[in-house]
Image: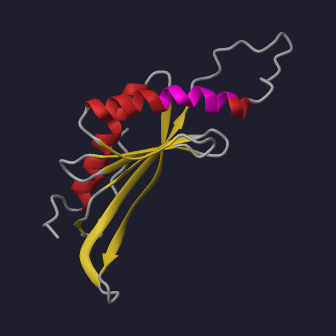
Amino acid sequence: MNQPQFDELQGYIRAEEHLRTAIDTLRPPYSVTPGLRNAVPYQDSSGQQTGLANVEVNYLLHPPESSDPADESGAEPADPVAQRMTDNVAVFQKLEELWLDGGYDIVTRTVDQPHRVLRVQDPRDGFTIALKQGTQGNLWLTASSAPVTRTRIKPPRPSL
């Protein structure tokens, strides 16, 4: 295995850089809130620590408020989940185009509803970035590092 390019802190910073590009492409009208931030240590085949870890950062995407006026009664659309999933198709298309233009390689493209996934990898640093859709049409972005040097630092505060 090659020597890691980053330590944990640098891995967190680089993960946020990858996500910043995607999030800036969607803002406005989308907003984000930070989610999970952690480092998972690697173990060798005998279960011993290796001195390496995988850093992961994710953000939840929040769609804009409905631009379709509700009917006069103020009622919700008949199937808001189906509407979110329909709206999400454009998000997946926009980020796929961004990532392909940026030199990323597609790792996974699952277009089946409801669990849609687009996962790409940056061949320059080995980071994997994913856009995922949940059962209710919720979206989140995740960046995971290639192996980084484990330092056991506390994850830095979200910057996006």
Q: Is residue 87 left or right of residue 100?
A: right
Magenta stretch prevailing secondary structure: helix
Q: Nearer the viewer, residue 13 or 56?
A: 56
Confirm whether the magenta stretch covers residue 90.
yes
For residue 71, above or below residue 81:
above
Which image quadrant is residue 133 in? Answer: top right
Residue located at (28% from left, 52% from top):
127
Q: Is residue 106 left or right of residue 150?
A: right
For residue 42, above or below residue 145:
below
Residue located at (77% from left, 30% from top):
79
Residue located at (40% from left, 32% from top):
95
Q: Nearer the viewer, residue 14 or 98?
A: 98
Confirm whether the magenta stretch covers residue 154.
no
Q: Residue furthest bottom?
A: 46
Which image quadrant is residue 94 in? Answer: top left
Q: Quadrant of the C terminus?
A: top left
Residue 69 picture location, percent across and down: 72, 12
Q: Residue furthest top?
A: 72
Residue 2 picture location, percent across and down: 14, 67
Q: Is residue 26 left or right of residue 124?
A: right
Q: Quadrant of the N terminus?
A: bottom left
Please provide the residue range marked out in magenta. Answer: 83-91
Q: Residue furthest right?
A: 73
Q: Nearer the viewer, residue 137 or 15?
A: 137
Residue 121 picture location, percent across and down: 30, 48
Residue located at (24% from left, 53% from top):
126
Q: Is residue 42 left or right of residue 70?
A: left
For residue 70, above or below residue 119:
above
Q: Nearer the viewer, residue 101 or 78?
A: 101
Residue 80 picture location, percent across and down: 73, 30
Describe the colour scheme in one phrase: secondary structure
